[in-house]
């Protein structure tokens, strides 16, 4: 990796890890892979930090094959081997389950099933943390999803403890814009697999991506300012809750409308 790169994205990753105490010495971290650019970039970055930072941790890569179509994972396997990260492929007929149920909210059900499989394998491997490749654009898009479709001001947190399963869920890329990851993938030659999900690009999240892009094109500082705003919330200036109750931070605030146990959320890759 070029040394100069640390100035434009490694700093944000390390700051997020420090701000939210994402990794403790001796941790074993499971990286949820899909083969998409975000999760592959996350694996690349975490393996770099494992080797060249003061952080002391080990990595395992877990890829859940949902059975949408046959996929050749040799490029992903080779990439993991080059980075000295063991790869575990978990195959489950999620696509068949969704087809049998005639599920209208296929993305939500798929995410829940994949999350359960990822968590189970992470626990079996002795991991304390599960790292997902959600970036700053995902944070903002989730906010708009909740605002427009759920009437709620919320998004997911960079780190959260899932007490029901005893795992820490971390998102080290939470401060990093998507365009930075796209540039990294291109410049570093990180392999990316094509999407095989039939719903890819046709979700409500895709529409939110257009909205975020529209605003950011006119206001270049939008993403950075949005991140700052999430850390400067004035609850006293928000409306009271219906029923006359004073506005306050609700239990579980910061989660997505789908819940933090839905590790990906609608339309998100791991």
Image (cartoon, helix red, strand yellow):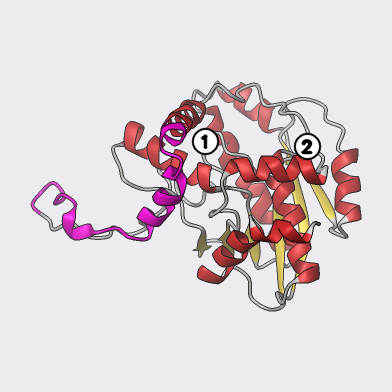
Q: How many marks?
A: 2
Residue 114 is left or right of residue 191, and the answer is left
Residue 160 is left or right of residue 75, and the answer is left
**Residue 95 lies in what quarter of the image?**
top right
Residue range in magenta is: 215-244
Residue position marked by numbered label 2 in the rendering:
192
Residue found 52% across the figure and 42% down from its top: 138
Q: Circles 2 and 1: CB distance less than 8 Å?
A: no
**Residue 149 lies in what quarter of the image?**
top left
Under tag 1, what secondary structure?
loop
Residue 90 image offset from top left, x and y in percent: 77, 45
Residue 88 is left or right of residue 209, and the answer is right
Under tag 2, what secondary structure?
loop
**Residue 136 seen in the current view:** yes
**Residue 121 seen in the current view:** no
Residue 181 image offset from top left, x and y in percent: 66, 45
Q: Was residue 110 drawn as part of the magenta stretch in this picture?
A: no
Q: Was residue 225 drawn as part of the magenta stretch in this picture?
A: yes
Q: Nearer the viewer, residue 55 or 10?
A: 10
Residue 24 image offset from top left, x and y in percent: 64, 76
State whether residue 229 is above or below residue 128. Answer: above
Q: Nearer the viewer, residue 184 or 251?
A: 184
State whether residue 18 is above or below residue 103. Answer: below
Mark seen at residue 47: none
Residue 221 image offset from top left, x and y in percent: 44, 45
Residue position marked by numbered label 1 in the rendering:
266
Residue 50 is left or right of residue 201, and the answer is right
Q: Mark 2 and mark 1: span between their CA atoms?
A: 21 Å
In the current view of this chain or complex, which residue is farthest to the left? 244
Q: Nearer the viewer, residue 172 or 240?
A: 172
């Amino acid at each position: 990796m070029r040394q100069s790169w640390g100035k434009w994205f490694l700093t944000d990753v390390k700051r997020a890890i420090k701000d939210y105490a994402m990794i403790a010495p001796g941790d074993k971290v499971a990286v949820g892979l899909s083969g998409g650019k975000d999760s592959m970039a996350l694996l690349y970055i975490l393996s770099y930090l494992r080797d060249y930072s003061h952080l002391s941790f080990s990595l395992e890569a877990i890829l859940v094959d949902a059975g949408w179509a046959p996929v050749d994972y040799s490029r992903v396997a080779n990439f993991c081997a080059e980075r000295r990260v063991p790869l575990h492929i978990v195959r489950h007929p999620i696509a068949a389950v969704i087809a049998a149920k005639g599920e209208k909210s296929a993305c939500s059900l798929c995410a829940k099933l994949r999350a359960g499989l990822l968590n189970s394998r992470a626990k079996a491997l002795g991991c304390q943390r599960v790292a997902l490749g959600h970036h700053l654009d995902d944070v903002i898009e989730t906010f708009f999803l909740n605002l427009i479709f759920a009437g709620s001001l919320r998004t997911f947190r960079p780190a959260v403890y899932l007490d029901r399963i005893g795992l820490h869920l971390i998102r080290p890329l939470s401060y990093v814009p998507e365009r930075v990851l796209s540039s990294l993938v291109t410049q570093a030659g990180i392999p990316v697999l094509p999407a095989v999900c039939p719903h890819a690009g046709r979700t409500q999240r895709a529409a939110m991506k257009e909205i975020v892009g529209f605003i950011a094109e006119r206001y270049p500082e939008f993403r950075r300012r949005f991140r700052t705003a999430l850390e400067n919330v004035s609850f006293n200036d928000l409306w009271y809750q219906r029923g006359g109750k004073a506005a306050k931070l609700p239990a579980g605030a910061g989660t997505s409308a789908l819940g933090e146990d839905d590790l990906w959320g609608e339309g998100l890759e791991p």
